[in-house]
Image (cartoon, rainbow, N blue to C red):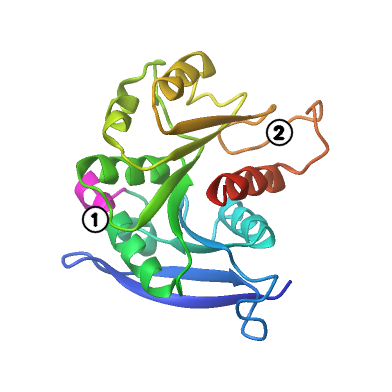
């Protein structure tokens, strides 16, 4: 399958300026709208300590492209600059909203979803809880960070205010999302679904005793695609 990529820039905030993004779209310019073309676009944010070029982000984007989903990966101002330190929550929330607006301009009529690994998924849900993002079809959490220290559900309180559908893809061994806590959280949400990834940790590293031969990135892409296109 041909993959068309496009390097983009968009303004995260007026104060922080521009950040980089990469649009990756299956089908390519030789087959627009063809059978191998994109069926949806997912705005894909990275985890707190990485950036758009991190291996997990590249592998996840590749797997989603292979399943027929275009991706728009993006940096935050702090990850664009590098050198450590994280932007304040206000800046990160503004950045995810700006990333969705950028994706909508590049979507060519495709339905637009948003999500990300760990921190970015939570930024999208917090942004939507604060105020709906027009045109956004749903949120995909690749390892929702339910807790950073002692297991609790404080970080999930805002999810009750999110109006769009949500998909949680969580590893069985994720130390930041105790399944005994995460499952009831998702069950109490009217518009959410949980898929547990066998033997996976927070970064989706899996054990040899995994109960399937399906590569983990392909599993994530398959489940996310089926959910987005249902």
What crowding class fits label 2: few (fewer than 14 Cα within 10 Å), some (14-19), or many (20 or more)? Answer: some
Say what secondary structure mark 1 lies in: helix
Q: Which residues are magenta?
A: 86-94
Query: Label 1: which residue?
Result: 94
**Most distant residue in the front direction:** 230
Question: Left or right of 93: which side holds 62?
Answer: right
Q: Is residue 205 magenta?
A: no
Q: In the figure, 32 relative to 142: above or below?
A: below
Q: Residue at x 42, y 47 (%)?
A: 138
Question: Left or right of 174: which side holds 49?
Answer: left
Asked if the residues shown at circle 1 and circle 2 are in contact, with their CB atoms under 8 angstroms apart, the answer is no
**Most distant residue in the left direction:** 15
User: Please, what is the dominant secondary structure of the magenta stretch?
Assistant: helix
Q: In the figure, 56 relative to 12: above or below?
A: above
Q: Quadrant of residue 53?
A: bottom right
Residue 206 tag number: 2
Q: In the figure, 169 relative to 150: above or below?
A: below
Position of the N terminus, as image quadrant, is bottom right
Which residue is nearer to you in this view: 183 or 75? 183
Q: CA distance from mark 1 to mark 2?
A: 33 Å
Which residue is nearer to you in this view: 157 or 48? 157
Q: Is residue 90 magenta?
A: yes
């Amino acid at each position: 399958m041909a993959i068309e990529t496009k390097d983009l820039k968009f303004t995260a905030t007026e104060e922080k300026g521009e950040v980089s993004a990469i649009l990756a779209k299956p089908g390519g310019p030789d087959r627009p709208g063809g059978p191998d073309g994109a069926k949806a676009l997912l705005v894909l944010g990275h985890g707190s300590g990485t950036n758009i070029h991190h291996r997990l982000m590249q592998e996840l984007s590749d797997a989603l492209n292979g399943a027929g989903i275009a991706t728009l990966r993006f940096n935050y101002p702090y990850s664009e600059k590098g050198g450590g330190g994280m932007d304040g929550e206000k800046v990160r929330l503004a950045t995810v909203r700006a990333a969705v607006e950028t994706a909508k301009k590049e979507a060519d009529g495709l339905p637009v979803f948003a999500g990300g690994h760990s921190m970015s998924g939570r930024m999208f849900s917090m942004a939507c809880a604060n105020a709906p993002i027009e045109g956004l079809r749903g949120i995909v959490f690749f390892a929702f960070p339910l807790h950073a220290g002692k297991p609790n559900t404080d970080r999930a309180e805002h999810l009750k205010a999110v109006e769009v559908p949500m998909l949680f893809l969580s590893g069985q061994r994720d130390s930041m999302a105790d399944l005994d806590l995460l499952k009831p959280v998702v069950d109490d949400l009217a518009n959410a679904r949980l898929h547990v990834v066998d033997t996976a940790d927070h970064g989706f590293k899996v054990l040899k005793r995994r109960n399937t031969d399906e590569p983990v990135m392909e599993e994530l892409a398959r489940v996310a695609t089926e959910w987005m296109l249902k």
